[in-house]
């Protein structure tokens, strides 16, 4: 599988995956939302971290999220912080079922 992300459309900058975030972005290419889950305490972690945000343990694995959750807030951006973003675009705060 190629780890090169394809540009979805002009005006959307490509992410720059790191060794830590590569499994998440590879999942995005497969249209799957992958997050980390702690093997010790069961906490789901996103944004990718080197250790669990619940127990600080190092035993994180990548799992597929259901993608279901509660939408708490959203906004439509009309003036981007970076000129590389084409507007308008939406930003949302979602609490996933997994936590």
Image (spheres, helix red, strand yellow):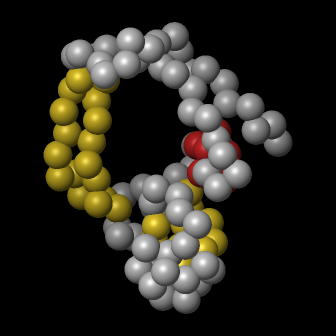
> What residue is shown at x 28% (from left), y 53% (from top)?
94
48 to the left or right of 77? right
Q: Hey, which quadrant is residue 74 in on the image?
A: top left
> What residue is shown at x 74% (from left), y 31% (from top)?
4
Res. 27 visible in picture: no
- Residue 21, how many percent across, how many down? 61, 51
Quarter of the image with the N terminus is top right
* Above-or-below relation of 92 to 85: below
- Residue 77, how many percent across, how many down? 23, 23
* Above-or-below relation of 49 to 76: below
> What residue is shown at x 64% (from left), y 41% (from top)?
17
- Residue most extreme to the right: 1
Q: How many marks?
A: 0
2 to the left or right of 28? right
- Residue 93, how many percent across, how many down? 26, 48
Res. 22 visible in picture: yes
- Residue most extreme to the bottom: 40
Residue sitting nearer the eye, 8 or 22: 22
Quarter of the image with the C terminus is bottom left
* Above-or-below relation of 64 to 76: below
- Residue 81, how many percent across, how many down? 31, 22
* Above-or-below relation of 78 to 36: above
Residue sitting nearer the eye, 4 or 64: 4
> What residue is shown at x 53% (from left), y 15% (from top)?
9
């Amino acid at each position: 599988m190629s780890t090169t992300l394809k540009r979805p459309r002009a005006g959307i900058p490509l992410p720059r995956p790191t060794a830590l975030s590569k499994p998440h972005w590879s999942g995005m290419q497969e249209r799957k939302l992958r997050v980390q889950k702690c093997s010790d305490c069961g906490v789901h972690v996103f944004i990718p971290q080197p250790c669990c945000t619940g127990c600080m343990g190092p035993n994180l694995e990548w799992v597929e999220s259901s993608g279901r959750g509660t939408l708490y807030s959203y906004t439509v951006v009309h003036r981007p912080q970076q000129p590389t973003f084409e507007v308008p675009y939406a930003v949302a705060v979602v609490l996933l079922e997994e936590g």
